[in-house]
Structures are given as C-alpha cells and as structure tokens.
Image: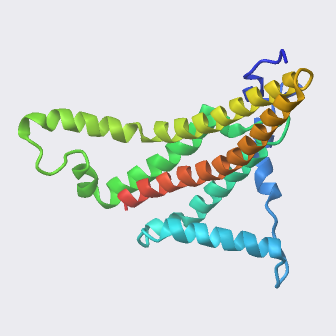
Amino acid sequence: MNENLFASFIAPTILGLPAAVLIILLPPLLIPTSKYLINNRLITTQQWLIKLTSKQMMTMHNTKGRTWSLMLVSLIIFIATTNLLGLLPHSFTPTTQLSMNLAMAIPLWAGAVIMGFRSKIKNALAHFLPQGTPTPLIPMLVIIETISLLIQPMALAVRLTANITAGHLLMHLIGSATLAMSTINLPSTLIIFTILILLTILEIAVALIQAYVFTLLVSLYLHDNT
C-alpha cells in the first residue's frame, strides 16, 4: 500500500544495468512463426489479422507509399505486443516512456516529411499556405502551419504515453482500493473488483487501439507526403 504510485513506470535495471533494451526485444520473440507448408489455426489467424490491418492502412497509398507496408505492420505489432505485455503483473511497459515513443515517432515522421520534400516539394510547401489566404495573414499562417508540422511527432508520442500511463495508474488505484476494502466490507470489495475486471478488459482494448492509432497517423503523414 505504501508503494510509490509511479514505481511501475521506472525503467528496470539488472545489476545496475538498464534492462529496457531486453524488454523491448522480448515482444518480437513471442510472435509465433511456422516452418511448415500448412499452418495451424494460430498462425492462420495471425496472418489474417496482419493482412487485414495492412490492407486497411495501405489502400489509400500509391506505389511509393506502399513500400512502407512492412515497416508499418511491424510497428503496429510491436506497439500492440508491448502494450499487452505491460498489462501483466509486475511488468514494465516501455510505451509509458515518452523518450521511447519520441524515438519511434520522430524518425518515422521525419522520413515521411523528407520523402515529401524530395518527391513533391511544391505540394509540400503548399501545405504551409492554404489557397485564398489574405495577404496580411500570410506570415502568421506560415508560422502556425510550421509549428503544427513540427509538433506532429510530439503529439504522436504524448498521445500514446498519456493513454497507456493513465490506464495503468487507474488500474493501480482501483487494485489498491480493492485490496484495502477486502478486510473492511466484502460487498464493496466485490463491486470494486468487478470494476477492476471491466477496466482490465477496457485496457486491453485501449492497448490495441492505441497501437492502431499511432500507426494509422504515421500512415496518414506518409500519405500526405507521397
């Protein structure tokens, strides 16, 4: 009960060395693969979900944008598995760290923007000045559009960090309340425990939805620049 509320968000260490790298490398190892010609149901379901997700994200892209399909599918699988593993007891969720989310968002955003400036520089520059803008407002709009462009990776990272962190904090608080009420009032404990179960189911959905939203927004940034 006296545990720090934010203790679960501290990056773990092993013998004084950071263990976050090992935790980040763990999710890809848990994805099942098959070496046989005929796959089992788990592999078949996994391939169907990957195909469905990639089809939804890649439909709006042209040929150049579809070259990012492998990267985007890998990104959504990595974020989803990392978020889900973070829901296990006594586990660490790397996506609650703003630094890690920025490390994912900035290179992907920068790659999409650089591709846009290289392939369609006129269209890329046209985003800074909407058509029909009054002349006195041109300097102000250029500044606003530049800031909105530069803030996109920060918005990506903060959105993912805030949603995952808020869910973990809420589960921690309700779990602590359930433990405290267990010795005081049993009916209230059952009600709070039911809320905790429902919240856990909601957090599983949030973990998957946030992975999809993060990847979808990167896909939209790519579509705007290809």
Q: Where does residue 65 sit, x and y in percent of width and height?
A: 45, 66
**Residue sitting farthest toward the bottom:** 37
Q: Where does residue 90 sit, x and y in percent of width and height?
A: 85, 34
Q: Where does residue 219 sit, x and y in percent of width and height?
A: 48, 58
On screen, residue 225 versus residue 77, left or right, reads left
**Residue sitting farthest toward the left:** 135
**Residue sitting farthest toward the right:** 183
Which residue is at 8% across, 34% downward?
A: 136
Q: Give the quadrant of the N terminus.
A: top right
> From the viewer's perspective, is residue 120 above or below residue 192?
below
> From the viewer's perspective, is residue 112 above or below residue 199?
below
The quadrant holding residue 14 is top right
Camera-side residue of 210 and 93:
210
Camera-side residue of 70 and 182:
182
On screen, residue 44 versus residue 73, left or right, reads right
On screen, residue 108 versus residue 24, left or right, reads left
Q: Where does residue 66 sit, x and y in percent of width and height?
A: 49, 69
The quadrant holding residue 12 is top right
Camera-side residue of 134 and 119:
134
Q: Give the quadrant of the C terminus.
A: bottom left
The quadrant holding residue 2 is top right
Q: Is residue 134 visible?
A: yes
> From the viewer's perspective, is residue 53 above or below residue 181?
below
Which residue is at 15% across, 51% downward?
A: 131
Which residue is at 38% across, 38% downward?
A: 150
